Amino acid sequence: MTSSASKRTASSEALPSVDKVVVIGTGFIGLPLALQLAKKGKTVVGVDIDENLVKAINDQSLNLDEAELQALLESDEVEENLVARTSAEEGDAFVISVPTPLTQPQKSPDLSAVEAAVESIIPHLTAGDVVNIESTIPPLTCDDIVAPMLSDAGFEPGEDVFLAHSPERILPGNVFEEIVHNDRVIGGYSERCSRAAAQLYEPFLEGDVYHTDLVSAELCKLMENTYRDVNIALANEFALIGGELGIDITDVIGLANNHPRVDILRPGIGVGGHCLPIDPWFLNEVDPEHTNLITTARRINDMMPEVTARRIRHALSAYDSPHILALGAAYKPDTQDQRESPASDIVAELQLDGYDIGHRDRHVDGMEYDDLRTLVDELDPDALVQLVCHSETNEELVALSDELERDDVLVLRPGAGNPLHPESNV
C-alpha cells in the first residue's frame, strides 16, 4: 500500500491506487466481495464483530451455501490475501457492508450499524481513500449522515476522500454468478468519487458499470426491490380473489400470461429475505405521502403467512389433533437463508394454535434430513405441508406421491402457489 504521505487527495487529477481493501461486515454481501478481491490479488481485510465468524474465515472452516464460494474461500489466493479481523485498520478503500434492518413496530430503517461502521473507519482514514457504502440505505443517507460524519472528522467528501454508494445486486443461492456478471450502479459524491469506487469492482466485474449521483444510486436499489414486491403482492391478491371464487388461480395466471404484454408472477406464502420485505419501507420513510401503493403491497405480502396458516387450518379441519410435517424453513427454494422467512412465521402461527408440528429443511443447519421417505416413516405425520419448494423435495414428493396417498398422508403445497387440495398438490 502507498504511504499516506504519497497519496493523492480526492480533488487531485489522478484516481487513487486501490491495493488494500477493508470490508466492514463479512456477511452475505461483504464476504463474497472480499473473496473475489482476494482471489484477484488484492490485499483484503474483512472486519466483523462476530469473533466466531472471523475465526472461521481465517482458518477457512466456514461452510458457505454455494460450492463456488466455498472453493474461493479455500483457494490459495484467498488464504494468502484475505485476513479477517474484529476491528478496522488502514487501507486504500473501505467498503461498508453491514445490515440495515427495520425497527419494530415502526417500520423505520435502523442505520445504527452503518453509522457505527463509518465511525470505526474514521481513525484509519487518510487523504485519498475511497469510502464506498454497499449497505442498502434510504435516499439521502450518504448526504445527510455519512458525508457529515466524514466532514466532522476532517475528511471533506470529494476533496479529501472519495465517497460513493454502490448497492449490491445479488441473489442468495446464486451469489458467485451474480456478483461477477450483474451490472453495477455506482453513485458518487462527485463523478470522480464514483469512478474511484469503480476500481473496487474492476478486478472481477464482467457486467456494465453505470455512474450516477448518490441519491439516484440509493433510490435505484430500493426501486428495483419495490418493483418486485409490488408485483408479488398483485399475484398474491389475485390468489386471494381466486380463493374466494373457488378456482385455481395458477391456471388463470397461465392463461392471462398468454397476453403479449402481461407477465403475472406466481403467488406464494409471503416474501422473505433481507431486501424485499425491508426496502419498500425505506421509501415510505422519506416520502410517506406518495408511497400508498408501495405500503399497501407490502402489507398484502406481510399478511400472506397468516392467510396461509388459516388455509392450512381449514384443510386440516376434519382431523382431530393432527400431527404435521412442515417442510422448508428458508425464505426461498434451494438456499439455507432464513432471513424474514414466511415459512417460519406460518409454523409459529400454527404452533400457537396448539398444532403438533415437526419442522424440517434439508438445507438449514439443525433441521436437515437426508431422505424424505425415512423422515415420513420416522415422524408418521397425518399431513405433510411443503412450505418451501426445494428442488430435491419436489422430486421426492413426485416419487412418493402414490405411497403417501396409500399411507393416508395429506399433502399440501401452499409454497407452490397451489390451492390446498390434496388431489392437485403433487
Image: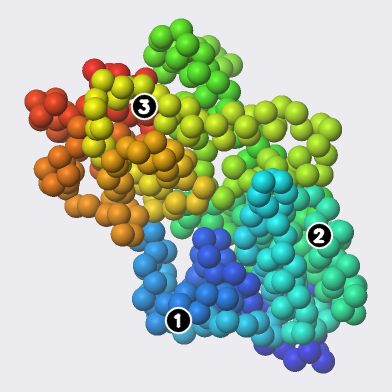
Closer-to-camera residue (15/336)? 336
The kind of residue tagged 1 is: Lys
The kind of residue tagged 3 is: Arg
- Residue 233 left/right relative to 39: right
Q: How many other residues sit within 10 Å of disc 1, few (<14), some (14-19) or many (≥20)?
A: some
**Where is mark 1, residue-wise?**
55
- Residue 201 left/right relative to 321: right
Q: Which element carries disc 3, helix, strand or loop?
A: helix
**Residue 142: which disc?**
2
- Relative image position of residue 5 (x, y in whole percent): 82, 92
Q: In which quarter of the image is the N terminus?
A: bottom right
Disc with the residue nearer the chain's start (2 vs 3): 2
**Where is mark 3, residue-wise?**
313
Q: Which element carries disc 2, helix, strand or loop?
A: helix
Marks 2 and 3, how far apart at CA: 47 Å
Marks 3 and 1, how far apart at CA: 45 Å
**Residue 419, visible in the rendered structure:** yes
The kind of residue tagged 2 is: Cys
Q: Residue 324 falls in which quadrant of the image? A: top left
Marks 2 and 1, how far apart at CA: 32 Å
Residue at the spot x=48%, y=19% of the render?
A: 239
- Residue 180 left/right relative to 365: right
**Residue 213, visible in the rendered structure:** no
- Relative image position of residue 128 (x, y in whole percent): 81, 78
Q: How many other residues sit within 10 Å of disc 3, few (<14), some (14-19) or many (≥20)?
A: some
